[in-house]
Image (spheres, helix red, strand yellow):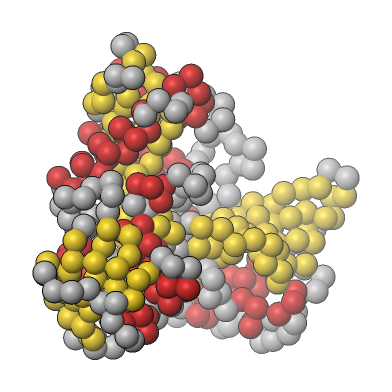
């Protein structure tokens, strides 16, 4: 079918929000015009069937932190939805192509997204770059090994929490591999939303040391109507700038009265939480979910932008069926080490051959090349190249995105 793709006007925002809401099965909010919706407004991309808006999508101007390096620009694909009446007609493919063209035109070396369905985005060149744990703790079994760190815990109201969380997150995300930036307009609208919601505005607690505020946690308390003593602490964010802050915040969250369960669905794979406990079994992993999906758009820039733990040289061949003439398709020489990296196109024979979506999964260090090779998704053309790539691309910590968008 023929559809027109273009950014929306301000007057078309209610229809844009409606398509997104219907596509994801939410209750439409036609009057919503907050910062979450209007931020980077010129990067919206809608599909029109005649006068009818039938598909919504957009890019956000974000940053993601690669291993051992400063944050890099990233196009954050979001709001990607199509009305049920127009599914399976090529609307999604057209919008995705437009969003990737927009990102490439703005010289963003990577594109990122958080996916509602896991089987869609690999065909557009995205791979799973970070994952997160869903965990539950039985408060009756939780016993911490050590006393709380020296410092002060303090509940803060929404206005202070919004400012503190924004400043603290900005500090922490710059050194946490995989972390995705949160633009300022999002904080009040999405993370501390004043409008009535089923769980309400989250509580916020800060940990203060002699240096000032070193950590913040936000959470809800969900009551059991049948047993008022059996509430659940739903943890939304734990943002520690120091190890001491992390320990203090988790001890606080596990000690809230009239609760029996502590739950979070956004915990790093390498969380130290089990090792804070006398019995690590008091924390149960109830799920592991993909979180951030990443697509490389400019391979040389992306390769040069991250850190490398050991010195080495590789020739990588990336296959990109969607964008065979794009900046991620072809062969690239990488010379890299702890002191920096250089990358360029080359005609040399490849050491490794893989698809661009699989490379996106390995870029932040979440997926090892050796694991991909075991599944046939990496071809090793030079003996030892897989092991060399794993050593070079190893990350200091498991990548953790934090942000959903």
Q: Is residue 313 left or right of residue 309?
A: left
Q: Quadrant of residue 73?
A: bottom left
The x and y percentages for residue 78 are 38, 41
The x and y percentages for residue 95 are 31, 33
Relative to residue 328, is residue 214 depicted above or below? below
Q: Please state which of residues 343 and 156 is positioned toward the viewer in this rendering.
A: 343
Which residue occupies 38% across, 33% down? Answer: 92
Q: Is residue 376 left or right of residue 314?
A: right
Residue 19 seen from this side: no
Q: Is residue 293 left or right of residue 98?
A: right
Looking at the image, which residue sits at the far top?
51
Looking at the image, which residue sits at the far right?
226
Q: Please state which of residues 74 and 351 is positioned toward the viewer in this rendering.
A: 351
Which part of the image, by quadrant, shows the N terminus?
Answer: top left
Residue 259 seen from this side: yes
Q: How many marks?
A: 0
Relative to residue 294, is residue 226 depicted above or below? above
Q: Please state which of residues 222 and 164 is positioned toward the viewer in this rendering.
A: 222
Q: Please state which of residues 79 and 87 is positioned toward the viewer in this rendering.
A: 87
Which residue occupies 50% across, 63% down? Answer: 131
The x and y percentages for residue 288 are 59, 62
Q: Is residue 390 left or right of residue 197?
A: left
Which residue occupies 18% across, 74% down? Answer: 349
Which residue occupies 60% across, 58% down? Answer: 265
Q: Quadrant of residue 6?
A: top left
The x and y percentages for residue 205 are 56, 62
């Amino acid at each position: 079918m023929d559809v027109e793709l273009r950014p929306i006007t301000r007057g078309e925002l209610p229809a844009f929000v409606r398509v997104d809401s219907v596509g994801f099965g939410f209750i439409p909010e036609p009057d919503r015009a907050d910062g979450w919706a209007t931020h980077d407004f010129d990067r919206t991309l809608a599909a029109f069937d005649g006068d009818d808006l039938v598909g919504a999508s957009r890019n956000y101007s974000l940053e993601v932190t690669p291993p051992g390096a400063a944050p890099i620009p990233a196009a954050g694909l979001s709001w990607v939805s199509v009305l049920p009446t127009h599914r399976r007609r090529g609307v999604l493919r057209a919008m995705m192509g437009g969003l990737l063209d927009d990102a490439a035109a703005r010289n963003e070396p990577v594109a990122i997204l958080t996916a509602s369905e896991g089987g869609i985005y690999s065909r557009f060149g995205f791979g799973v770059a970070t994952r997160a744990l869903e965990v539950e703790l039985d408060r009756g079994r939780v016993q911490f090994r050590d006393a709380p760190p020296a410092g002060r815990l303090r509940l803060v109201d929404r206005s202070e929490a919004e400012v503190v969380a924004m400043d603290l997150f900005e500090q922490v995300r710059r050194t946490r591999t995989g972390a995705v930036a949160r633009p300022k307009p999002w904080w009040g609208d999405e993370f501390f939303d004043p409008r009535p919601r089923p769980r309400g505005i989250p509580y916020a607690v800060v940990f203060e040391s002699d240096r000032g505020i070193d950590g913040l946690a936000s959470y809800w308390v969900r009551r059991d109507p049948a047993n008022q003593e059996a509430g659940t602490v739903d943890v939304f964010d734990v943002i520690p700038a120091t190890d001491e802050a992390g320990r203090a915040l988790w001890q606080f969250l596990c000690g809230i009265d009239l609760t029996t369960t502590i739950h979070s669905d956004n915990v790093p794979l390498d969380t130290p939480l089990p090792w804070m406990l006398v019995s690590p079994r008091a924390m149960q992993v109830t799920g592991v979910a993909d979180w951030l999906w990443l697509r490389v758009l400019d391979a040389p820039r992306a390769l040069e932008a991250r850190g490398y733990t050991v010195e080495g040289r590789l020739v990588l061949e990336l296959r990109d069926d969607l964008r065979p003439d794009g900046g991620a398709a072809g062969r690239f020489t990488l010379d890299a080490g702890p002191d920096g990296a250089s990358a360029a196109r080359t005609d040399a024979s490849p050491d490794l051959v893989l698809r661009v979506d699989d490379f996106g999964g390995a870029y932040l260090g979440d997926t090892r090349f050796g694991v991909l090779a075991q599944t046939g998704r990496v071809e090793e053309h030079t003996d030892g190249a897989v092991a060399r790539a794993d050593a070079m691309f190893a990350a200091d910590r498991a990548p953790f995105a934090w942000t959903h968008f």
